[in-house]
Amino acid sequence: MRIIFIGLVAIILTSCKIVQNKTNFHKNVVVAHRGAWKTLGLPQNSIASLKQAIKLGYRGSEFDVRMTSDDSLVIHHDPDFNNLEIEKTTFAELRKFKLSNGEELPTLHEYLSAGLANNSGTMLVCEIKPYDGGAERADKVATKVVQTVKDLNAQKLVGYISFDYNILKKVHQLDPKATTQYLEANKTPEEVAADGLTGVDYYFTAFQKNKDWISMAKKKGITLNAWTVNNPEDMDWLLKDGFDFITTNEPELLLSKEKALKK
Ligand code: MG
């Protein structure tokens, strides 16, 4: 009897651990593209826009990572910041300039640290930008990004996206459990699944042109994401087709549409 009791306790504890190891992301499809910046007039990719996305309970908040000439990882969409090309400028030079809300240009470490605070279920959707500096440098960026995520113990909250297929394959190699979604619609969901990546995140018209890709992704058990969906009619059909994520500059609108559909 005692052995059975101990066994039962062990099973319960093990199942609790399994639950703990899996992040329960918010149950909506909304990924705020470059954070939730629009309504409050915040800079895109700012920590303030990330915190706003977390506060509003979106399933994901996206941001872009680039590497400086002296190998620092910073969060910025465009290749240049204050007319300085990020890839060819040192971190110290770039950091002399602030974002429009007074924030410093965030490092990946700072951005993820902010994203881990008071976050009960918003995925930190990390876009690793393709690299002009060749395959070796792209490999280095992927390795440094994954290492930073591991250093912060943030693996369960971070998902990776990239237009560079090799960068995503490198991420998968370094962290086989990582969420990895490919952005360039030049591979079928079947091909993406065969390489061990976990999803496709394509410009939404790619799914209009290739309608079978939606069922193919579902059959292969990989996730569906679409960017950047700002038009109400486009939101409607993607919501009806059962997308797991929809990336948008209009997160409030998308969330209200999704809620209305569930009623
Ligand atoms: Mg991006």
Image (cartoon, rainbow, N blue to C red):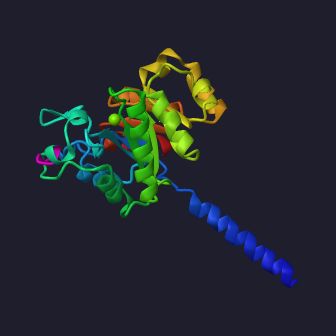
Q: Residue at x 80, y 75 (%)?
A: 7
Q: Is residue 243 visible?
A: no
Q: What stretch is highlighted in magenta?
A: 94-98
Q: Main secondary structure of the magenta part?
A: loop
**Residue 3, quarter of picture:** bottom right
Q: In this view, does 231 lie above or below 106?
A: above
Q: Looking at this view, is 201 or 29 the one in front?
A: 201
Q: In this view, does 170 lie to the left or right of 54?
A: right
Q: Which residue is drawn at 29% across and 46% down?
A: 72
**Residue 2, quarter of picture:** bottom right
Q: In this view, does 175 lie to the left or right of 67?
A: right
Horizontal and vertical percent position of residue 242: 54, 35
Horizontal and vertical percent position of residue 262: 49, 44
For the N terminus, the quadrant is: bottom right
Q: Report the number of discs.
A: 0
Q: Does the magenta stretch include residue 139?
A: no
Q: Residue at x 69, y 67 (%)?
A: 14
**Residue 231, quarter of picture:** top left
Q: Is residue 67 above or below residue 109?
A: above
Q: Looking at this view, is 47 or 153 the one in front?
A: 153
Q: In this view, does 196 lie above or below 114?
A: above
Q: Looking at this view, is 73 or 116 the one in front?
A: 73
